[in-house]
Image: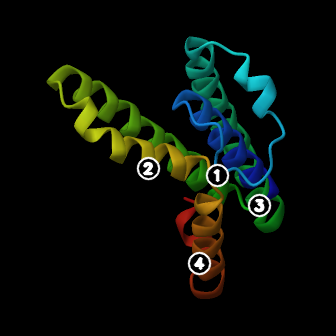
Amino acid sequence: MGLTLIRENLFLEINAILSGENVNRANFYLFYDYFASFSIQKLSLLKWVLSIAFIVVMIATSYGALHFWYEKKQYNKITGWFYLVTIAVLLLLVVVTKVTGVFDDAYVILRKVLGFLQSPLPLFILFSMYFYLDRSVDIRKFDK
């Protein structure tokens, strides 16, 4: 949860600078002065790099937490496929919306999916699903 707070704060600071605001909605101003010295192009690139980095960190955190909590190879596969399919659908949507010229219209949806991947929500959803499966289904029937 602390990681998502830091992520949110970083993006609030960067977005405030990009939109020319002197005061932003960040909870604390750790990097505002440092980021203010960046060019617009550098800040835009930084947002993409940070987005990818936070997605990778959240995937690794989710995978590790679920692996250590449940210790089931089947759940590891489901977790991997969940993230792989979500990212593949996101990339497909980006390509399709770029080719068809509706990227700007679909940006809000694409941004929500990116935000979802950078949040602990997938971990919570998968944890809840595995918890339910552990209580209601014998997963060994599906290991064949």
Q: Residue 1 — which label?
A: 3
Of the 4 image quadrants, the one containing the C terminus is: bottom right
* First along the sequence among labels 4 and 1: 1
- What type is the residue that disc 3 sits on? Met
Q: Which mark is residue 133?
A: 4
Q: Are marks 4 and 3 in contact (CB under 8 Å)?
A: no
Pinpoint residue 69: horizontal percent, then vertical percent: 81, 66
Classify mark 2: helix, strand or loop: helix
Name above or below for residue 91 compared with residue 41.
Answer: below
Label 1 sits on a secondary structure element that is loop
36 is higher (above) or lower (below) than 93: above
Q: Are marks 2 and 4 in contact (CB under 8 Å)?
A: no
Of labels 2 and 3, earlier in sequence is 3
Residue 45 - label? none
The N terminus, quarter of image = bottom right
The alpha-carbon separation of the residues under discs 4 and 3 comes to 25 Å
Q: Residues within 10 Å of mark 4 (few under 14, many from 20)?
A: few
- Mark 2 surroundings within 10 Å by alpha-carbon count, few (fewer than 14), some (14 through 19), many (20 or more): few
Q: Which residue is mark 2?
A: 112
Mark 2 vs 1: CB contact within 8 A: no
Q: Please tell me whether residue 37 is drawn above or below residue 60 in the rendered image.
A: above
User: What residue is at 19 percent from the left and 31 percent from the top?
Assistant: 102
First in sequence, mark 2 or 1: give its number.
1
- Mark carried by residue 25: 1
